[in-house]
Image (cartoon, grey):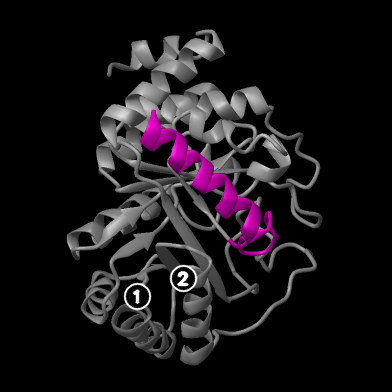
């Protein structure tokens, strides 16, 4: 779809846009719903200055800080994610890369998870080298997560310690190594509609398999702690536009959905999303697992009977 037609969707009545997005979801990816669980395997003390992030050492948030967890702890978390109904499990670490020793630990955990747990292993470990990606792939990793966060134009407003091109190059390198890629970003950081559309078009060009959409959760101690939240209507409109442009991709709504949409979580699926994170996020808690599992069962029932 041409950019001009996508831009027209910004002004389209929301009910019409939701109808279009639901049709695109139904025809593009069907009734498939993807659920993920994650572990914050290494927390805090990150040298990058992402202005939204509680884990940056540049700011004074009150999160827990700890080194990389051991293999048994990571595998145990994967088993819990599977018991919660998640189909994928992500190992997430703070920082822009891993040491050789840390990479060995993650590869060891990935190997056990892929062989013994019965859940698809993913990882989000920063800007790794092609060789590291190959090693992870050989250990059994199936998907790599690396957000572009926003548009290239807006990116300098939120990060100064690394450039946008590094994020794009990391995605390309992971795909070259044979990994699927999960990449999206955070909405509500002050970006324009044009920035959101730029982001969606780049993800389409990069041909990522999964697109996680987060809504900014302002965290005390970060430069964005007083940023006003995105409106529920703008959140739904953004999900719908991403679905229309990316009809055959998994679109997951992740952090911030609770604070933005509150008790109307089903609206994200009406707007074209087909996935969510279950069991909490990196530094904040989400809804209870039971609430999300019940919602997903209702959505699956509706889609399969529709």
Do labels 1 and 2 touch, CB within 8 Å? yes
Of pointers 1 and 2, the one earlier in the residue sequence: 2
Q: Is residue 300 magenta?
A: yes
236 is higher (above) or lower (below) than 227: above
245 is higher (above) or lower (below) than 171: above
Q: Nearer the viewer, residue 107 or 168?
A: 107
Displayed quadrant of residue 121: bottom left
Neighbourhood count class around disc 1 (C-alpha, 10 Å): few under 14, some 14–19, many 20 upward: some
Neighbourhood count class around disc 2 (C-alpha, 10 Å): few under 14, some 14–19, many 20 upward: many
Q: Secondary structure at mark 2?
A: helix
**Position in image of residue 7 (x %, y %):** 43, 14
Magenta highlight: main SS: helix
Mark drawn on residue 299: none
Q: Residue at x 65, y 66 (%)?
A: 55
Q: Nearer the viewer, residue 234 or 271?
A: 271
Mark drawn on residue 82: 2
Quarter the C terminus occupies? top left
Using residue 2 as the reference point, say whether residue 68 is left or right of it: right
Cα gap from disc 1 to disc 2, whole angstroms: 8 Å
**Position in image of residue 213 (x %, y %):** 51, 42
Q: Is residue 251 magenta?
A: no
Displayed quadrant of residue 41: bottom right
**Position in image of residue 289 (x %, y %):** 62, 60
**Which residue is tagged 1?**
118
Quarter the N terminus occupies? top left
Q: Magenta region: which residues?
A: 279-306
**Position in image of residue 77 (x %, y %):** 53, 78
Q: Residue at x 45, y 55 (%)?
A: 35
Q: Is residue 228 visible?
A: yes
Q: Secondary structure at mark 1?
A: loop
Displayed quadrant of residue 178: bottom left
Using residue 60 as the reference point, say whether residue 264 is left or right of it: left
């Amino acid at each position: 779809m041409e950019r001009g037609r996508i831009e027209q969707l910004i002004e389209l009545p929301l009910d019409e846009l939701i109808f279009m997005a639901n049709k695109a979801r139904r025809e593009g990816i069907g009734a498939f719903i993807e659920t993920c669980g994650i572990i914050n395997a290494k927390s805090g003390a990150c040298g990058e200055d992402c202005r939204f992030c509680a884990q940056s050492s540049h700011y004074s948030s009150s999160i827990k800080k700890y080194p990389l967890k051991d293999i048994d702890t990571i595998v145990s978390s994967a088993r819990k994610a599977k018991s919660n109904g998640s189909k994928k499990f992500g190992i997430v670490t703070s920082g822009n890369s891993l040491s050789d020793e840390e990479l060995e630990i993650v590869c060891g955990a990935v190997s056990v998870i892929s062989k013994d747990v019965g859940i698809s292993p993913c990882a989000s470990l920063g800007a790794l080298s092609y060789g590291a990606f190959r090693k992870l792939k050989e250990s059994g990793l199936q998907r790599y997560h690396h957000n572009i966060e926003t548009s290239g134009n807006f990116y300098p407003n939120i990060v100064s310690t690394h450039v946008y091109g590094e994020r794009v190059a990391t995605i390309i390198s992971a795909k070259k190594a044979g990994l699927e890629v999960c990449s999206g970003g955070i909405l509500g950081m002050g970006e324009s509609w044009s920035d959101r559309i730029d982001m969606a078009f780049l993800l389409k060009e990069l041909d990522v398999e999964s697109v996680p959409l987060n809504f900014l959760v302002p965290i005390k101690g970060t430069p964005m702690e007083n940023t006003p939240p995105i409106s529920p209507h703008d959140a739904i409109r953004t999900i719908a536009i991403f679905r229309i442009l990316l009809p055959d991709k998994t679109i997951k709504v992740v952090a911030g959905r609770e604070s933005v949409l509150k008790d109307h979580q089903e609206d994200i699926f009406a707007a074209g999303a087909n996935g969510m994170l279950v069991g909490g996020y990196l530094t904040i808690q989400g809804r209870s697992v039971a609430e999300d599992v019940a919602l997903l069962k209702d959505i699956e029932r509706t889609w399969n009977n529709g």
